[in-house]
Amino acid sequence: HCSTIDEYGNNQCHYSWGETVILGINVTTTQPFNENDRVYASMKVDYFVPWVLDCAVCGEDCVMKIPVVDFEVTIPMLPCPLEVEDIPTLLEVPLDDASPFEGVPFH
């Protein structure tokens, strides 16, 4: 699924509809997380459209807005405080069998 890897993990990944994306989670702190802690991600869609994620680690749902199509995906987060041992090490995200944007022009 991914063509390169670096010290932070896999890069330039491609998944098809109907597949399951498996995310590895590595936490290096021993302190519990609270409502002030955030998770950030900087990604590219189709190698050039920026997609930035900024969500609370716990206490509120993470709402991701997919760029270009303005489609929102909500990930329920665990309540705060969140102990490190309560964080899963793998997160499986199944993709729908077909794109919810089938037939929608993007140009």
Image (cartoon, helix red, strand yellow):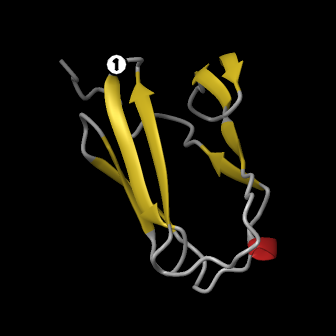
Give residue 61's position: percent from left, percent from top: 45, 72
Residue at 44% across, 33% down: 43
Left or right: where does residue 105 sit relative to residue 97?
Answer: left
Query: Which quadrant of the structure image shows residue 104?
Result: top left
Amino acid at circle 1 = Phe
Give residue 94's position: percent from left, percent from top: 64, 46
Q: Residue furthest left?
A: 107
* Foreground of the two, 95 or 23: 23
Q: Secondary structure at mark 1?
A: loop
Left or right: where does residue 105 sit relative to residue 47?
Answer: left
* Foreground of the two, 18 or 75: 75
Residue at 61% across, 76% down: 33
Q: Residue furthest top?
A: 3
Q: Is residue 30 above or below residue 22?
A: below
Local crowd size for mark 1, using a 10 Å CA cut-off: few (<14), some (14–19), many (≥20): few
Q: How many marks do you count on the picture?
A: 1
Left or right: where does residue 8 sit relative to residue 73?
Answer: right
Residue 63 visible in the picture: yes
Residue at 48% across, 80% down: 35
Query: Which quadrant of the structure image shows residue 54?
Result: bottom left
Residue 1 visible in the picture: no
Query: Which quadrant of the structure image shows residue 18?
Result: top right
Tell me the quadrant of the picture where the N terminus can be found. top right
Q: Is residue 52 above or below residue 84?
A: above
Q: Is residue 56 above or below residue 35?
A: above
* Foreground of the two, 63 or 53: 53
Residue at 70% across, 21% down: 5
Tell me the quadrant of the picture where the C terminus can be found. top left
Residue holding disc 1: 48
Give residue 74's position: percent from left, percent from top: 44, 62
